Structures are given as C-alpha cells and as structure tokens.
C-alpha cells in the first residue's frame, strides 16, 4: 500500500493546476481516492459559494485517481458528468471517489463531493466518470 500511496502522491505533485488551486490528495486505496481543498475567497463565486468549476475539478481529479489506481497506472478521464445538489458553503471541500467497475482499459467511477462547515459534511455534488489507461 505504501508504494501505491507514493505513486499517487508523485502523480498528484506533478499536476501544476492542483498545486495552483491548493488541493491535497488526502487518501488513496487500490480503487479509491480522496481530495481536499480549503475554501479560499478566490475559490468562490459572486454569492460566496465555492465555484462549480472548483467542485467539478475535485470530482474529476478524484475520479481519475480512483480509476487509474483500479486500472494499475496512469489514467485519463474520457467521460464525466456532475450534478450539483446544494451550494457548497464552508471551510473545506472533500471529494471521495471509488471505482465501481474496472476492466483491462476502462473504469467507471463515482464521486461524492462534500462541503465541510464546523466539522459537519453536507453533500453538495455527485459525479460519475469513465477513465481509460493512459499507458
């Protein structure tokens, strides 16, 4: 498991946009990933909610990590869908993705994105995506 974690952290660290936005790869397993982001003012839209693009980035990247880990290597998203359930208000966003099915080249993944406020998580978006091996 340590080798898997090191591989995932290395891939994450090589993503300039992930560093720029301030995201963190918090946890991984052989078929799942969790990303976290402390909500800053520049992540918000005009109503003070986390911007949908920020939520979508977290879901997409978590899905790609979960699928890539399930497939055993580097991966790319080939299809992605997101439903926003409620405005994301709080101090942090958490995206948890799992590979629901993985074959030789493709994995189908789901992700829940939560807004965390005062230690309470509220579901703000659900996403699904298809991931393909990039190797």
Image (cartoon, rainbow, N blue to C red):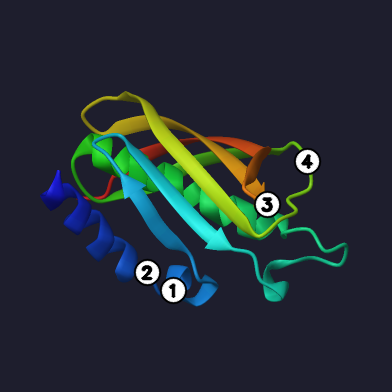
The residue indicated by pointer 4 is: 86
Tell me what residue is drawn at x 27 percent, y 39 percent: 29
Label 3 SS: loop
Residue appearing at x 21%, y 52% in the figure:
5
Using the image, tell me which numbered label, if any, was put on residue 19: 1
Task: Say which label, 2 or 4, has the lower sequence index.
Answer: 2
Q: Secondary structure at mark 1?
A: helix
Residue at far right of view:
47
Callout 4 touching callout 3 (CB < 8 Å): no
Mark 4 → mark 3, Cα distance in angstroms: 17 Å
Residue 73: image x %, image y %? 20, 47
Q: Quadrant of residue 83?
A: top right
Q: Closer to the observer: label 2 or label 4?
A: 4
Q: Going from the N terminus, do you reach mark 1 or mark 4 first?
A: 1
* Secondary structure category for the residue under label 2: loop
Instruction: Give the Cα distance between marks 2 and 4.
Output: 28 Å
Q: Residue at x 47, y 40 (%)?
A: 96
In three-dimensional space, the C-alpha distance between marks 1 and 4, rounded to whole angstroms, equals 26 Å
Which quadrant would the N terminus be assigned to in this image?
Answer: top left
Find disc 2 in the rendering and name its residue: 15
Which residue is denoted by mark 3 in the rendering? Answer: 118
Residue at the spot 43% in from the left edge and 42% down from the top edge: 63
Taking 121 as reference, is 65 left or right? Answer: left
């Amino acid at each position: 498991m340590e080798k898997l974690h090191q591989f995932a952290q290395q891939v994450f660290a090589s993503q300039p946009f992930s560093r720029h936005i301030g995201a963190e790869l918090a946890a991984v397993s052989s078929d799942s990933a969790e990303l976290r982001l402390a909500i800053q003012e520049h992540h918000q839209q005009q109503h003070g909610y986390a911007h949908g693009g920020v939520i979508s980035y977290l879901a997409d990247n978590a899905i790609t990590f979960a699928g890539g880990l399930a497939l055993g290597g580097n991966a790319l998203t080939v299809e992605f869908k997101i439903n926003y359930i409620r405005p994301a208000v709080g101090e942090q966003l958490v995206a948890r993705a799992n590979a629901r099915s993985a074959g030789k080249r493709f994995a189908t993944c789901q992700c829940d994105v939560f807004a965390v406020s005062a230690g309470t998580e509220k579901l703000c978006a659900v996403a699904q995506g298809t991931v393909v091996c990039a190797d």
